[in-house]
Image (spheres, rainbow, N blue to C red):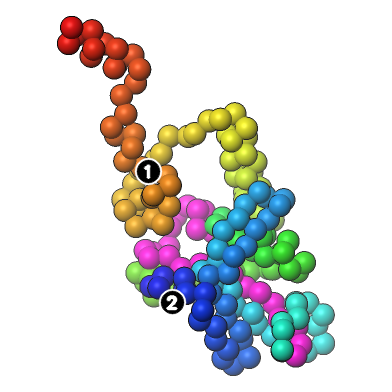
Amino acid sequence: MHRRADDASIRESRLGKVVSRALPISSYTLGFSGICDVVEFIPSPPGKSEGIHLPNRKGLYLPLPVEYKHGKEKHDNSDRAQLCAQAICLEEMLAVDIPKGYLFYGKTKRRVEVELDDELRTLVKKISDEMHAYFRRGYTPRVKKSKACRSCSLADICLPTLEEKVTSASEYIQQEIEKA
């Protein structure tokens, strides 16, 4: 599913919509950087002055992030927060307001529209502040390992199975004393 979404060389245009894949994004405000799976640039309605100019295209276009997920819709806000963070990055980069985005779930083959409201934006800001506070303290939170870890693109960075093999210093010393 992600093969096409992650291929930055694929650009397409259909029904006036321009689709960009694997678009690098960043936000100085949030201190985030990443890559959007897909950003759809849809034509702004005639007479509206919302949107951005695209090279070699007439009119204005509104960017809408689309995040692809393998599974099904979750009961928590994690997917919505990720999408909102992408939109905030795009807003900062392109100086445009992005009111909504989409989550596409591979298991259900369903696309869900997500309103990027103040409540969700506040959640993303809170998560960003918390993450940066951890970094300043040099604190790494414990991994909450789940079956989702198996298909996560960050598993090589997060190393969710590492904690299973960790022995505390006091346990190590006790084991060495018992060996002697």
Quarter holding the N terminus? bottom left
Disc 2 marks which amino acid? Arg
Q: Is residue 49 above or below residue 159?
A: below
Disc 1 marks which amino acid? Leu
Q: Is residue 87 above or below residue 77?
A: below
Give the structural element (helix, strand or loop) at label 1.
Answer: loop
The answer to which of 15 and 29 lies nearer the viewer is 29
Residue 159: image tag: 1
Residue 93 x/y as whole percent? 72, 64
Does the image show residue 10? Answer: yes
Asked whether, in this view, residue 99 is left or right of residue 171, the answer is right
Residue 4: image tag: 2
Residue 75 x/y as whole percent? 44, 55
In the image, is residue 77 part of the stretch drawn in magenta? yes
Does the image show residue 130? Answer: no
Q: Is residue 122 above or below residue 60?
A: above
Asked whether, in this view, residue 91 is left or right of residue 143, the answer is right
- Quarter where residue 108 is shown: bottom left
In the image, is residue 26 part of the stretch drawn in magenta? no
Crowd around label 2: few <14 · some 14–19 · many ≥20 (10 Å): few
Q: Is residue 133 above or below residue 167?
A: below
Tell me the distance, in whole angstroms, between the alpha carbons under discs 1 and 2.
26 Å
Q: Residue at x 52, y 53 (%)?
A: 77
Residue 139 x/y as whole percent? 53, 30
Asked whether, in this view, residue 14 is left or right of residue 30, the answer is left
Residue 121 x/y as whole percent? 66, 54
Q: Residue at x 47, y 71 (%)?
A: 6
The answer to which of 43 and 178 lies nearer the viewer is 178
Range drawn in magenta: 57-80
